[in-house]
Image (tube, coloured by chain):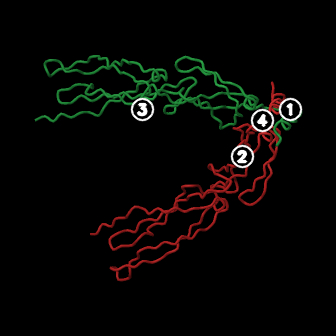
Chain colours: A red, B green
Amino acid sequence: LVVKKQDPAIERDLHLALEDLFYGCTKKMKISRRVMNEDGHTSSIKDKILSIDVKPGWKQGTRIKFEKEGDQGPNCIPADIVFVVQEKPHPWFSRQQDDLIYTSHIDLEKALTGFSVEIQTLDGRFINVPVNDIVHPKYTKIVPGEGMPMSRDPSQKGNLIIQFEIHFPEKLSADRKRLVRQALAH
Amino acid sequence: LVVKKQDPAIERDLHLALEDLFYGCTKKMKISRRVMNEDGHTSSIKDKILSIDVKPGWKQGTRIKFEKEGDQGPNCIPADIVFVVQEKPHPWFSRQQDDLIYTSHIDLEKALTGFSVEIQTLDGRFINVPVNDIVHPKYTKIVPGEGMPMSRDPSQKGNLIIQFEIHFPEKLSADRKRLVRQALAH
């Protein structure tokens, strides 16, 4: 009796852009593995393509397991191969669960008087978000339904959360300070 | 031959106010322990006072060990008793290593036009810190030497770091917005 042992699973990162996780996509991953020849004693290295069907809304850390796709050997069960989703950084969005976070940089003047933000969505549309509230450092503007698709039901989407970095002037003249006092005095 | 074993150390929290850690102090801690009687077979519970000489500048997590002050028994080495410093929250300071952090709440008007902050130190003095720079949300004002004493040399002290929470107005009239634009326009 030969007791066959299975090695621990082999993990590999699967780097995906937010757009891939938004739309879903198919990723083909090439692996090189030791395969037993027909004689049952010798082996050789062969390439194999594994196809991963990325669903819309998958998150960082999602694991996709291919059973027994590791090296074959006479006395072992091949290891499982597991791909682990890693989100690639996006130039202007970050992700929190099903929500997308966008940071808008604005001058203090706009923060106090109103403005609008134009944002390009992951599916390439430009949306214009008017902000008429006074924007303080912890203010966020929430745009419902413009976040990531939810993996259980990709027709449903999370929110787009706009946060603001307010740029203050470095200096103000005495005249301008007087106007500030008039504008903001209680 | 009897091999005497020692139980793992007994840990107890020693809660200290920032003032205690600033000045140093002596803390007396009562422990109840099983002590062998003179016959060498029977034992009884007795109270004991352990005295801890808190040095200025000790930090959260500092460990003070009293060797073999745990329960006595015929076939064991009494466990060590270890006190672990835990900082009590202070009403207006928090601590980062040797620095003290103070959060000043100010109106946007003051942030843009100047003001001064009055702070009561841990040794009860009132210090007045003028701020003439424009205060943006990430601005900090550093007052050297008004932090915690350094435990290696308590005559040396860390910094007091003042951070600011800027309160924005909730609404502004059209007139006031016009003044804001005049004051802050490029």
| Amino acid type assigned to the residue bearing label 2 in the image | Ile
Q: Disc 2 designates what residue? A: A162
**Rendered view: B95 above or below A89:** above
Q: Which residue is mark 3?
A: B61
Tell me the residue that label 4 is attached to.
A172
Circle 2 — which element? strand
Q: Chain of mark 3?
A: B
Image quarter (top left, top right, bottom left or bottom right) of the N terminus of chain B: top left
Report how many numbered discs are placed on residues in the image: 4
- Specify the subunit that label 1 lies on: B
Q: Amino acid at mark 4?
A: Leu
Q: Nearer the viewer, mark 3 or mark 2?
A: 3
- The foreground one among A105 and B38 is A105
* In this rendering, the label closer to the viewer, 1 or 2: 1
**Residue in the picture at 48% in, 76% down:** A47
* Mark 3 or mark 1: whose residue is earlier in sequence: 3
Say which element carries label 3: loop
Which residue is pictured at 82% across the width and 43% down the height? Answer: B186
Q: Seen in the image, is B2 located left or right of residue B92?
A: left
Left or right, residue B130 beside residue B181: left
Give the residue displayed 63% in from the left and 56% down from the top. A151
Residue topped by disc 1: B176
Q: Residues within 10 Å of mark 4 (few under 14, many from 20)?
A: some
